[in-house]
Amino acid sequence: MIDHCSSWVERAGWVDNFDAAVEGRLPQDRRGREFSDSDVYKLMEAMAWEIGRTGDEHLEERFRSYTARIAPVQEPDGYLNTMFGRPGQAPRYSDLQWGHELYCYGHLIQAAVARARTTGVDDDFVRIARRAADHVCEAFGPEGNQGVCGHPEIEVALVELYRLTGEQRYLDQARLFVERRGHGVLGDIEFGAQYYQDHEPVREQAVFDGHAVRALYLAAGAADLAIEDGDDELLEAVTRQTLTTLARRTYLTGGMGAHHEGESFGQDYELPPDRAYSETCAGVASVMLNHRLLLATGDPRHADAVERTLYNVVATSPAEDGKAFYYTNTLHQRNPGQPADPEHASPRAASSLRAPWFHVSCCPTNVSRTIASLGAYVASVDDGGVQLHQYAGATVRAHLADGDVVLRMVTDYPADGTVRVEVQEAPGAPWTLSLRVPAWAEGATLAVGDEPGRSVEPGYAQVERAFEPGDVVVLTLPVTARWTWPDPRVDAVRGQVAVERGPVVLCVESVDLGDDVGTVRVHTDEAPQEEGGRVLVRTSRVALADTPWPYGTEPDAGAVQGVSDRDTLVPLVPYHRWANRGPSTMRVWMPTAG
Amino acid sequence: MIDHCSSWVERAGWVDNFDAAVEGRLPQDRRGREFSDSDVYKLMEAMAWEIGRTGDEHLEERFRSYTARIAPVQEPDGYLNTMFGRPGQAPRYSDLQWGHELYCYGHLIQAAVARARTTGVDDDFVRIARRAADHVCEAFGPEGNQGVCGHPEIEVALVELYRLTGEQRYLDQARLFVERRGHGVLGDIEFGAQYYQDHEPVREQAVFDGHAVRALYLAAGAADLAIEDGDDELLEAVTRQTLTTLARRTYLTGGMGAHHEGESFGQDYELPPDRAYSETCAGVASVMLNHRLLLATGDPRHADAVERTLYNVVATSPAEDGKAFYYTNTLHQRNPGQPADPEHASPRAASSLRAPWFHVSCCPTNVSRTIASLGAYVASVDDGGVQLHQYAGATVRAHLADGDVVLRMVTDYPADGTVRVEVQEAPGAPWTLSLRVPAWAEGATLAVGDEPGRSVEPGYAQVERAFEPGDVVVLTLPVTARWTWPDPRVDAVRGQVAVERGPVVLCVESVDLGDDVGTVRVHTDEAPQEEGGRVLVRTSRVALADTPWPYGTEPDAGAVQGVSDRDTLVPLVPYHRWANRGPSTMRVWMPTAG
């Protein structure tokens, strides 16, 4: 995926923009949208995490080469952007609504934080980012420009840079940006000021609104700020907004953003499956936000949200070969789409099949940096012990007050519900191992060594003891397929049902049905079956007539010509794997029979 | 409504743009979007029809005054536009995708046709339009610019001007525009070329796609062209597209356009009530198109569509006082909106309450010209007699081969289903009076004089005889309220039902319920009741819990705390009257009980 994105940022000319700046070829040679610099930085963040994980030398070389191409573009005062400020370009910060300059710094800084965290060094790239951050503090500080960026992102980056460096001015600047926002500083636009969260101060909002990625990046920054400031009021506000959004404005997949128009959240319970925008980047942003709130509050609902979103949004975007991506993630495909051209960037975000690249190509690099940093979401540590939040084959190393812990996690989760945790190193003193039991996992059990397993409730199951190397803890999660019904306020899926298996949302695809998915009716009086790794549901099929008007005085408006007996067992596939076998129609929510 | 629009085109500076052009104050003093000239023309079309109907002297004076302000802006070669071509402005026709120059001519010409048809004279205004049309034929003819306008409209106008003048070149130019389109002449945009119907030639399309107003204006022009050319293939294509759109892409209200994004048609059966765009102007365009197809084919489905759209889209847009308008017409309001400021133009098309004017204010003038020309939709005449298509208090005058017919129509339709047609003048010879029986009117009866009424089927009921002055024909349509169910392919309203009464779609409003409309469940085993002019339905109410996640393993996801006994009779109101009593929540489609 990283190689694919590298080839496209080169091919699209977005790295060349930096060379063009040095060679005086701007603005005439500039390519890409105003925020294209940010995709180079996001790709570098992915590379930094991956270099840290694997030590890949080719990636390291490429990272240094990008750094060398970017460095000379930075101006003496730290300003760095290929779109503004040169003769023939608009002046610096002349378009805070749409210019994305601070947004680009945000991604530059996040990439630098990843670089420093994984290498421990203050290399050229990290120094570029610090100079940019210093420039931002100068230009937008208490005495400077009193604006904010139309696209939040700088906030979360500045707090992270503060954590890395201990420089108070970065935290102070993040606070200024968060507090300035919401007072109409950006001016009105057709979408309304809520598009960029400038309609209401962050701490006064009840729920996320407007452009989903903007809202969630801002909230992640506000959460970070609240944590570092010990600002309980702000943390509570962001937590409340997040929980209300999960309760009323989130798709079953964890996807956020119900409107194509303005790429925005819809109103409460307005969650049309066939018009789900559910932008991949909003999924990434929700993972970022919920991870922060998990660490701040310990509330397992945030870890559940991270898991749901990783499996059903972030994992849905890339094709199996990592060379094409969904920008939006519909839950209901009505027409089989046309495959995207693998050689051309798609001008359309909401294309019906995955595309190799987009004119606005935020999602591929965002997926890359998220997958490269997945390890960060697995476990956390505090004075009392280690908490396991996500389950995957992994080795977890932690430093407790009394000594080091090394755990080996062995599992085929989510295909299988057994998570085996082997203690490889442990201090002699007692500590607590916590394992998340997802909200859906009614009937989970936990066994320690040869002791009989005990039932554990959703939340965190805990084992406190003086573990010894060789100890084994086994969590068993009931990942059998289950019916899932919607709240009746989600009008768009009334009379329909979905199937989930563990954290994975399933769907029916026309390629498995041999017919359009509009003809399926499922029998919910019979549980979904599992057979050879596949989930099957009992269905009938309706025969539908061509009618001149889709409304009538009879139920079904006279369109149903007949319903077959309950006969066909239809296989479902994980939603994140859909459309990997070519064009098809697909639905997550299936009408019930009878 | 005309006075209201006049005051706003003045106040918004859109008439002043013409003065500014003459006084050399352009581009610096120009106000409004690139198509603002067209709203002055659409208002003048409304004025022309209204002057023709009433002879209003103040309107006549205003019409002449506008003409005098527009006339000197026209350049010697006929070009006329306040947005292009002057020093400091983009050159003429430099932006066919978005510039709307030909679109503006289209509305200028339609206004001139209305003027000429109602006054019978070739006044200054008509001459301006003819010079503009001549210029278009010169500039875009076989030897000229081979482009088309990003927004269709010129096509229908040119055919109408051909009908008025008999000038073949206008018809030829309309044909060029219709045939050029659909070959990618406008270039690609993010919405895709179907946005402006440039993805496929008109005669190859299966159904309307892309921007709804653009598609429907184009189809109206293509229908007019097909009729004048005797081009059966083209007429069949447009008819097929229209009937397929009615069958699969039309709201119960007759509204068209399911997407806010791109103001476009959705896919087949993708008709979310809460995200209905259903632009007022698309309703106007559908009336134009279906009226043309009715005259061309005699198919009563087109007259039904005109009626449905007039009562439930065109009539919904304006507030009762005619001083505020909906641009979009949702079928489900989830949150009570904020009243629009009566003193300021709204920047947002999809505002939740009616606004006095918009930054893009196509709808108010479009409603005005439609209402001012309503008489045109009532009746038609052919060699065999007179056809009554729409029912309203009216006097119909027609010239048959054997002499004149004068009919007086007396009715309170649609409040009451009785339509009384009195013959006031008739030739001695036999002729046929046809009366449309709408598709919903099962059980209609027709009585002639003292004869016993006979049952008549949906379609056209006919009476052929040598009518004499004083003869009376009475059509009785069963306008009692009825349940209407959706086709199951309209997934978004599964398990829900609407109520219609005659041609009028009803809705439930929170102001009548004393509670949010999300709590209503209707009992369809009991027919809607009528009482004192009101329609009432039997309901239960559900109590809904605050839940942390809107999906669960139990039906209703555990959200329903209780359902009341069947008790409350809730009044419904005509959908076109909703939100006239202040902010409320509203729904046309109501979940069924049990």
Image (cartoon, coloured by chain):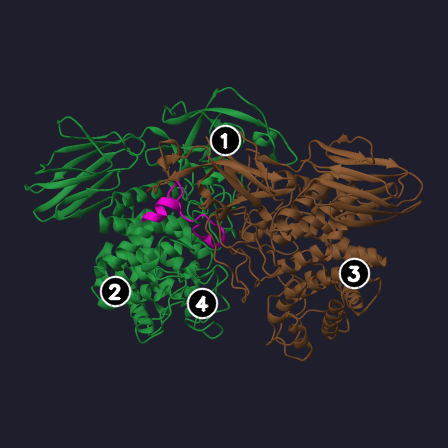
Chain colours: A green, B brown
**How far apart are the two marked residues, 3 and 4, measured between alpha carbons?**
45 Å
Q: x, y (%) of residue B549?
A: 34, 41
Please, what is the three-letter code of the amino acid marked with disc 4? Answer: Gly
Q: x, y (%) of residue B552?
A: 36, 35
**In the rendered image, the vertical position of residue A275 relative to residue B348, given as above or below:** above
* Dominant secondary structure of the residues highlighted in magenta in the image: loop
**Dot in front, 1 or 3:** 3
The answer to whether marks 3 and 2 sit on the same chain is: no
Q: x, y (%) of residue A518?
A: 53, 32
Q: Which residue is mark 2?
A: A171
Q: Which class describes the residues within 10 Å of circle 1: few (<14), some (14-19), or many (20+)?
A: some
Please, what is the three-letter code of the amino acid marked with disc 2? Answer: Leu
**Residue A43 occupies quadrant:** bottom left
Any magenta on residue A36? no
**Dot in front, 1 or 4:** 4
Instruction: Identify the subunit bearing mark 4.
Output: A
Residue closer to the observer: B291 or A322: B291
Instruction: State the residue at coordinates (52%, 25%).
Output: A541
Instruction: Identify the subunit bearing mark 1.
Output: A
Q: Which residues are magenta?
A: A243-266
Element marked by disc 4:
loop
Q: Which residue is mark 1?
A: A511
Q: Which mark is residue B52?
A: 3
Q: Which of the two labelled residues, at mark 1 and mark 4, occupies the earlier sequence position?
A: 4
Image side of residue B224 versus residue B278, left or right? right
Instruction: State the residue at coordinates (28%, 49%).
Output: A291
The answer to whether marks 1 and 4 sit on the same chain is: yes
Q: Which mark is residue A55?
A: none
Q: Which class describes the residues within 10 Å of circle 4: few (<14), some (14-19), or many (20+)?
A: few
Report if the CB atoms under discs 1 and 2 are less than 8 Å apart.
Answer: no
Any magenta on residue A263? yes
Q: Which residue is mark 4?
A: A187
